[in-house]
Structures are given as structure tokens and as C-alpha cells.
Amino acid sequence: MTVIGPHPPPSPRRDSPRTDAEPLAFTRTEFLGGTARAWGTTTLLLIVGWAVLTGGFSLIVGTAAILLVSVPAVVIGSPGAYALGRLLRRLPRVGAHLLAFSAYGALVGVVTTTVTLPAVLGDSGGGWIAATAYLVNVPLSAIGLAGAWFITMRRALRLDAEGFGDVVRTTDPDAATEDALDDRYRIIDPGQRRRQRWRG
């Protein structure tokens, strides 16, 4: 494709790890960004979910508890997520990645809830409160982690496409000047002039 204008085409992203052999590989920077995105997404989902479930009663106390638990959870769960991403980097099927990270997010939700319940309830975590905690925390953790991976993947592939694509400038920088000159020095055909009515 021919590039019009003074701007050269963008150069490829040299830091992109994605190749034909590893179509869904990620850099450490992209992984850290995805980890932060997973923490923010999952934490927000849990805060909103528990606030809706309790009618806003747990908004203040529940938010503080979720933030307190989510930080060590993301630190403990990050190595496994990194290993899972490395394991699946050669697999081009996005659905398989979403399924795997959903399962891993659910596992993190189960472990985190199991460890947290005794500290919150003061016992082994039995009863309907514990069952409700699992029903809320586990699926929201799965959705948060899988959704964060999907957003990170889309963003990385979009940056790759922008780095390797050609840019065609459709705007002519001289068009505005030429149009202004045409309007200023337009030649009027004498034959198209209106005949003026004779006034006696």
C-alpha cells in the first residue's frame, strides 16, 4: 500500500512475544497489567455483588474486608496464573483460555473463601452463610479473572495490529489551501450572470 503524506508507516512492536508458534504469549509487563486488571475487576464485582445481596448493608464493612483479603489473594494466585498462561501460549483458541482461566479463578475463589471464613465466622465456616459466601465469591472470581485475561488479550492483539499495519492518509494537506484559492479566484461565466431589469 502507498503511504500518502509526510508521516512514515509505524514500525512493528519489537517487544511483542506473539508469533505463529506462540500466538497468545504475553510479556511480563502485559502480565502485570493483566494481574492488576484482574484484581480490580474481581474486587469491584465482589463489592457490588455483596452490596446488592445485603441491600447495601455490607457496603462499608464488606468493602474493607474484601480489599483486605483480595491483596494477598492476588499475590498468592499470580504465580499460578502466570504458569497457566505460559502453558497455553501455543494454543490459539481463545475459548480454551477463557475456560482455563475461569476454572483457575474459581479455584482461587474457593481457596480464599475457605481460608477467610474461619476468621470471619469464628468456626469452620458451616451453615447458610458459608454456602452463600461460596455461591457469591467463586463465580465472581471466575468471571473477574477470565474477563481480565480477555481484555488484556484484546488490547495486546490490537497493539500488534496497529504496529504492523499500514497507515493510509486520506486527507490531502494541500486540499484546504487549494479550495480557498478556488473560492477566492473563481471565474464567473458572463453568460450565467442574471440580466438586470431596466429601471426607468
Image (cartoon, rainbow, N blue to C red):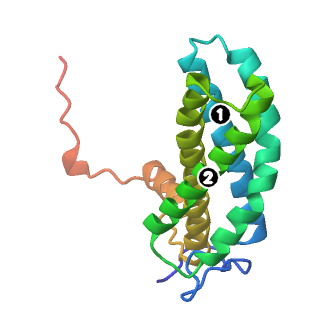
In the image, is 106 to the left or to the right of 183? right
Local crowd size for mark 1, using a 10 Å CA cut-off: few (<14), some (14–19), many (≥20)? some
Q: Residue at x 61, y 66 (%)?
A: 156
* Label 2 close to label 1 by CB (< 8 Å): no
What separation in Å lies between label 2 and label 1 (alpha carbons)? 18 Å
In the image: residue 147, left or right of residue 75: left
Position in image of residue 81 (x %, y %): 68, 63
Label 1 sits on residue? 44
- Amino acid of disc 1: Leu
Q: State the residue at coordinates (58%, 78%).
A: 164
Q: Residue at x 74, y 23 (%)?
A: 121
Q: Residue furthest bottom?
A: 21
Q: Nearer the viewer, residue 61 or 199?
A: 61
Determine whether 12 is above or below 156 in the image: below
Whole-percent x, y for residue 48 in the image: 60, 26
Disc 2, SS = helix
Characterize the local packing of mark 2: few (<14), some (14-19) or many (20 or more) Cα atoms within 10 angstroms.
Answer: some
Residue 169 point in image, percent of width and height? 52, 68
Of the numbered discs 2 and 1, the one sitting upstream in the chain is: 1
For disc 2, the marked residue is: 107
- In-front residue for pair 169/147: 147
How far across and down, in percent of the image, does residue 64 sit? Answer: 79, 24
In this rendered view, identify the residue nearer to me: 63 or 183: 63
